[in-house]
Image (cartoon, rainbow, N blue to C red):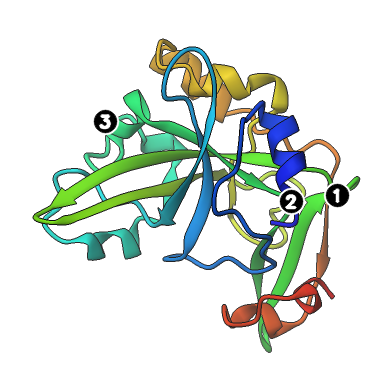
Amino acid sequence: MLATPEQLIETFGLEQVPGYKISYNIAPGQKILGIVQPDRNGLSAVSLDWGLVPSWAKDSKIGHSLINARAETLGDKPSFKAAYHKRRCLIPATGFYEWQKTENGKQAYHICREDSQLFAFAGLWEHWEHGANTLYSCTIITAAANGLMQPIHERMPVIIGAEQYRFWLDPRQSRQSLDQLLANPDYGGMRLYPVSDRVNNPRHDDRHCLE
């Protein structure tokens, strides 16, 4: 994510963004910025491990297989049900990568706003404790691909429109209203373009990833 701390503070009404740094290539298992609503008065930025670990899990390695959550089954899956009800978050981004299968392998694409501005994915977060270990983790919610994304991949992350940020984070919202929101992701004004396979390696984290 290429947004500055000042842009994040202004967009989400934050007081500060502790520990944040710009990144061109965030991979599952790494730290990712999340926006949560700890109370009804304001939003906070927190650092989360990308790969959700449910509170009941015996081993944190389960997070490796829970980097994404299907919007269609959130309210029923044991791994996501409690978080969907109580612990929703926003994952700020200025773009993301997706890979298209081709005869010669996989072609990476970068997807972003036409104006390169900030947006936010719908996410869930969890608090896990095991002995002396404490972990705050998250997953990004996905839905069936729309017309823009279908040529690239069958799934896409759900983008929450800016006017719906507070609604998504509000713990008082019903499952029905949340399901309706997820069924209408905000992909207006998005574009995609091919990039090199440099992004396939998470150790590559510089502006060349976008070329």
- Badge 1: how crowded within 10 Å, few (<14), some, or many (20+)? some
Q: Nearer the viewer, residue 58 or 22?
A: 22
Determine whether the residue tagged by mark 2 lies in a helix, strand or loop. loop
Instruction: Mark 3 or mark 1: name the one nearer the start of the chain.
Output: 3
* Front label number (2 vs 3): 2
x%, y% of residue 184?
63, 28
- The residue type indicated by label 2 comes to Thr
Instruction: Mark 2 or mark 3: name the one nearer the start of the chain.
Output: 3
Which residue is label 3 attached to? Answer: 82
Q: Are marks 2 and 1 in contact (CB under 8 Å)?
A: yes
Tell me how far mark 2 sits from mark 1, CA to CA.
6 Å
Q: Nearer the viewer, residue 136 or 89?
A: 136
Residue drawn at 63 percent across, 60 percent down: 153
- The residue type indicated by label 1 comes to Ser
- The mark found on residue 116 in the picture is 1
Which residue is label 2 attached to? Answer: 94
Determine whether the residue tagged by mark 3 lies in a helix, strand or loop. helix
Q: Quadrant of the N terminus?
A: bottom right
Tell me how far mark 2 sits from mark 3, CA to CA.
28 Å
Q: Quadrant of the C terminus?
A: bottom right
- The residue type indicated by label 3 comes to Ala
